Image (cartoon, coloured by chain):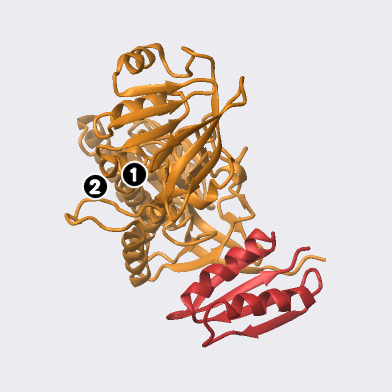
Chain colours: A red, B orange
Amino acid sequence: MAEYELDCLGEACPIPLVKAEKKLAELEIGDLLIVLIDHSCAMKNVPEWARKEGHNVEIEEVDDGEWECVIEKVK
Amino acid sequence: MEREKKIEEYDVVIIGGGAGGLTAGIYSGRARLKTLLIEKSLVGGLATYTNEIENYPGFPEGTTGLGLMNLFEKQAKKFGVKFKGTDVKSVDFSGEVKIVETFRNIYKSKVVIVASGGRPRVTGAENEETFLFDKGISFCATCDAASNSGKDVLIIGSGDAAIEEGMFLTKFANKVIVSVIHDEGKMDCNEIAKAEALANPKMEFVWNTVVKRFEGGEHLENVVLENLRTKEEVNIKVPTCFEFIGYLPNTEIFNDKLNMTDKGYVLVNENMETNVSGVYAVGDVTDKFLKQVATAVGDGAIAGYAAEKFIAEEETYKSQILGKDGVVFVYDASEAGCRDCLAEVEKLEKEMQKNHCVTRVDIYKSRGLSDRMEIDEVPRLAIVKGGKIVKILGENFDPEEVKSILA
């Protein structure tokens, strides 16, 4: 049940998605991955992918144009 | 082991960020209620899938669904509404404080507004996802009729919605082709609609067929139907295919918690109240006549306003009604009988001097407080002692009895 942060600020699509996929694969079930995003395209495709995979997802705008996508690995 | 969930408290929690939920947020935020809106995917809801909205008032040049919803969101944020992008796992409406749970949080709220919307049922045919909504597969004739003027269109389904919308489309389209799963002459719609449709020269039926796959480039070009009897493939070249095979409200998490129709739509009254006090429902999730941005906005305004009233009355009820020992006089100022009784109550008030207070509740203004006291006839005199209503008396009350109960 560890928590990891993935800083993707300043990175455009598809880099955040690719990084998130890679990082999540290393995690244990129950771990949290927090992806920091400031690219509106990644703000859509990262949670969309995680949801499709069946993980728990929460996205929050922490600042104007800056989001935190929290993914709990469930399988 | 479960991760510990963070508890947060709100005045209003709105489940769903479409047109109805956002409008409810604008109203409750503007009423200075601490408001949270939870949306499972993108804020804006079903309207964001519509490329052009031409019938929403105030936009004579038309607007895009996404553009319009961005404006709604901006306006809600301006009034301090907080947004969470996650899905609701469960709700508990059994207590006075309503509980809404997501995977990381437990939200406690005085009011919950259900605005979870719905989704159209789809055929499940090959490539369907590629062409959904503005790419050629539509679920709304009202939305997409004008853009199909003079063209051929295809309809999937033979229920009331399919046939009635199909007839509407014949006013715009060159030809309306209907794919029906049943044998020739058999349809799911009512007999009147069926007779009219069969007699309409612009309508053409393809019996015993279902959709096998959708084809095209950027936009839909061809729909391949399969004849269930002969297994033959039928090509229908159309830019738009309308699917009318049902609509599924997103109400799974409210099963056994809210009263719904047998199809799963939440039942509400004209004030958007569900059967649970403090829980409202708005927009496409409710059992309603017309599903449009304009009607969802109306629902949202009512629920946001009702939420503010409900919370204010709840606070008054606790502090003014149950907060101190005394007498609560419930009356209707527009009724002569009540006004006579008021004189008696004022006499009693003088006799009791300052030992106990007398509160007046005029139901002519609002029935919220009297409903909470479970009083439906007036005039009535409720005696409150130790934070509870201990007795309710009628108009011929005995002042001595009142004094002795309070003593």
Q: In the rendered structure, the residue with mark 1 lies on which chain?
A: B
Say which residue label 1 marks: B292
Judge whether B8 appears above or below A8 on screen.
above
* Placement of the N terminus of chain B among the 4 image quadrants: bottom right
Point out residue B335 in the picture as x, y percentages from the top left corner. 22, 32
Q: Earlier in the sequence, mark 2 or mark 1?
A: 2
Q: Secondary structure at mark 1?
A: loop
Say which residue label 2 marks: B55
Query: For this view, does B46 lie left or right of residue B143?
Result: right
Query: For this view, does B275 lie left or right of residue B231?
Result: left
Query: For this view, does B228 lie left or right of residue B15?
Result: right
Mark 2 and mark 1: span between their CA atoms? 9 Å
Point out residue B324 in the picture as x, y percentages from the top left corner. 46, 56
Q: Secondary structure at mark 2?
A: loop
* Amino acid marked by disc 2: Asn
Point out residue B12 in the picture as x, y percentages from the top left corner. 46, 59
- The residue at the point 24 percent across, 47 percent down is B55
Judge whether B1 appears above or below A26 on screen.
above
Answer whether labels 2 and 1 touch (C-beta < 8 Å): yes
Name the foreground residue: A51 vs B98: A51
Query: For this view, does B393 lie left or right of residue A35?
Result: left
Residue B147 occupies quadrant: top left
* Amino acid marked by disc 1: Gln
Q: Count all numbered tags in the image, as a single digit.
A: 2
Q: Around disc 2, counting alpha carbons within 10 Å, would you say few (fewer than 14), some (14 to 19), or many (20 or more)?
A: some
Residue B378 occupies quadrant: top left
Instruction: Say which mark, if any, is on residue B364.
Output: none
